[in-house]
């Protein structure tokens, strides 16, 4: 009887374990499908929006050309186009945000309450603060109320109300970090504390380990603020306004006059009407690519990234892309197994060209050029590196501010990164590291070729 019972229990455990294993494999598969679909959906809307903004640039040129033929240098039609472009910079990416949620849910991903809360919180912040903080509205409503920022907050609220399943990892808040060189913004620091990885401190942060006294010692976070935002913060297109086209800093063109005439030829071909070259010197609101963001894609690709071939020149541009992240909690049935989080990140990007050989940003001015979206490796996208544990974004954008003001009191319970700061604070912990290094530092091996991330190679090659 006893033997029988023991045998039955073992059989039961094997059964549960087997069930868990299959469940993990299935959830991973679902997360991957849902994540990829969400990234592609958002990127498709980015491509569509860029093409619409491009069409409207050409319509502006056509309207101004016609006005010039009538002897005037302004056109209500051109102004209406510019207004529409200003709205599209918000509506387009946020429609992509909504579409990516739908794609994720249709592929079996559930709403994540943390992600939803983040977007809802941000909508509240936009509603309360942006009218005062950014009085230079990207577009004006007529009559005045509601302002464009209230429109924006309403759109975010609608998306949050439906629940966020796939978090947008291509975001740029108007108030953001200028760089991530601060130790508190470096996930490796937290991992080193968690694992007592003293060698990491030896190579990267020895003075921090020696000199740190309390949380009051941290230098302020490198915060910068966008003064006149015109792009949505989620899945932004990184466009800017330009008053006149004859002083456009045309991409890779030293001969700006030739570039201008090429542009007129390209735009004329689109409208099937010869455009008046004088539109180049007429003041209007043209939408152009932000040169600082639409740089070479190869600048974003980590060194030694295992691409099979070189990036072709025509596709060698960065700029708008769509990265998303999925985190699904998973309960296991096997006794003693902790709950797990299965995560998947994915990125996609609009691809296109002007003619056969020119990248879409050839003229700096946005033109309809995008005809495809593809998945790209996450590490070649605009997604921030991020931490290895869930909650990294929440930690750096929400928890750190309170921590730097109130110290350990300000930390959030249940956050992996906040927990590490609690371990880091007492002096004996750091003394343990110093003592260990005094005896063992010669055993530390530098495992990476240096570099900022310190993780060596790429973490997310898919
Ligand atoms: Zn935290």
Image (spheres, rainbow, N blue to C red):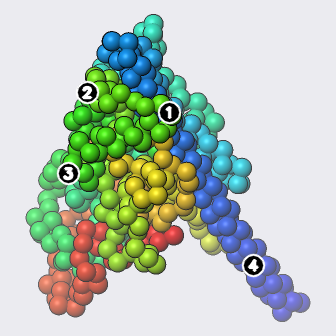
Residue that label 4 marks: 18
Query: Secondary structure under badge 1?
Result: helix
Mark pair 4, 3: CA separation: 65 Å
Mark pair 4, 2: CA separation: 71 Å
N-term-proximal mark, 4 vs 2: 4
Residue that label 1 marks: 271
Query: Secondary structure under badge 2?
Result: helix
Label 4: few (<14), some (14–19) or many (≥20) C-alpha neighbours in 10 Å: some
Specify the label residue 281 is tagged with: 2
Q: Residue at x 43, y 72 (%)?
A: 459
Residue that label 3 marks: 254
Relative to the observer, which residue lies in front, 119 or 90? Answer: 90
Q: Residue at x 40, y 73 (%)?
A: 310
Q: Please, which residue is most extreme toward the right here?
A: 1
Rendered position, 243 above or below 444: above
Residue 421, located in which quarter of the rendered image?
A: bottom left
N-term-proximal mark, 1 vs 4: 4
């Amino acid at each position: 009887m006893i033997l029988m019972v023991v045998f039955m229990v073992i059989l039961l455990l094997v059964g549960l374990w087997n069930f868990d294993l299959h469940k993990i494999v299935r959830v991973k598969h679902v997360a991957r499908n849902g994540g990829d679909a969400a990234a592609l959906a958002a990127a498709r809307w980015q491509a569509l929006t860029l093409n619409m903004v491009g069409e409207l640039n050409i319509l502006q040129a056509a309207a101004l050309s016609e006005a010039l033929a009538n002897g005037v240098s302004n056109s209500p039609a051109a102004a209406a186009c510019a207004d529409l472009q200003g709205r599209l910079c918000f509506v387009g990416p946020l429609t992509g945000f909504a579409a990516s949620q739908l794609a994720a849910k249709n592929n079996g991903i559930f709403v994540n309450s943390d992600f939803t809360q983040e977007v809802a919180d941000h909508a509240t912040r936009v509603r309360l603060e942006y009218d005062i903080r950014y009085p230079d509205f990207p577009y004006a409503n007529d009559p005045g109320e509601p302002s464009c920022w209230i429109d924006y907050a309403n759109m975010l609220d609608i998306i949050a109300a439906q629940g966020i399943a796939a978090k947008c990892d291509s975001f740029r808040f108007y108030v953001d970090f200028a760089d991530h060189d601060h130790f508190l913004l470096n996930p490796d620091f937290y991992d080193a504390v968690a694992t007592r990885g003293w060698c990491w401190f030896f190579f990267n942060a020895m003075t921090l380990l020696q000199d740190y006294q309390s949380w009051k010692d941290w230098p302020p976070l490198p915060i910068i603020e966008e003064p006149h935002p015109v792009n949505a913060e989620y899945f932004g297109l990184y466009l800017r306004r330009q008053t006149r086209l004859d002083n456009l800093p045309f991409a890779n063109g030293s001969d700006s006059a030739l570039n201008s005439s090429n542009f007129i030829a390209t735009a004329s071909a689109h409208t099937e009407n010869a455009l008046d070259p004088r539109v180049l010197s007429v003041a209007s609101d043209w939408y152009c690519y932000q040169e600082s963001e639409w740089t070479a894609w190869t600048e974003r690709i980590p060194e030694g990234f295992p691409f099979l071939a070189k990036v072709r020149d025509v596709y060698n541009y960065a700029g708008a892309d769509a990265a998303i992240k999925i985190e699904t909690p998973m309960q296991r049935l096997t006794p003693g197994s902790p709950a797990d989080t299965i995560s998947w990140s994915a990125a996609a990007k609009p691809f296109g060209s002007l003619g056969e050989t020119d990248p879409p940003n050839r003229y700096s001015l946005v033109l309809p050029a995008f005809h495809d979206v593809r998945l790209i490796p996450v590490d070649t996208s605009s997604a921030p590196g991020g931490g290895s544990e869930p909650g990294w974004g929440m930690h750096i954008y929400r928890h750190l501010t309170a921590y730097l003001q109130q110290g350990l009191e300000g930390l959030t319970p249940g956050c992996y990164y906040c927990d590490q700061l609690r371990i880091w604070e007492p002096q004996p912990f750091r003394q343990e590291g110093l003592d260990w290094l005094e005896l063992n530092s010669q055993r530390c091996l530098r495992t990476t070729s240096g570099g900022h991330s310190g993780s060596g190679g790429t973490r997310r090659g898919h």
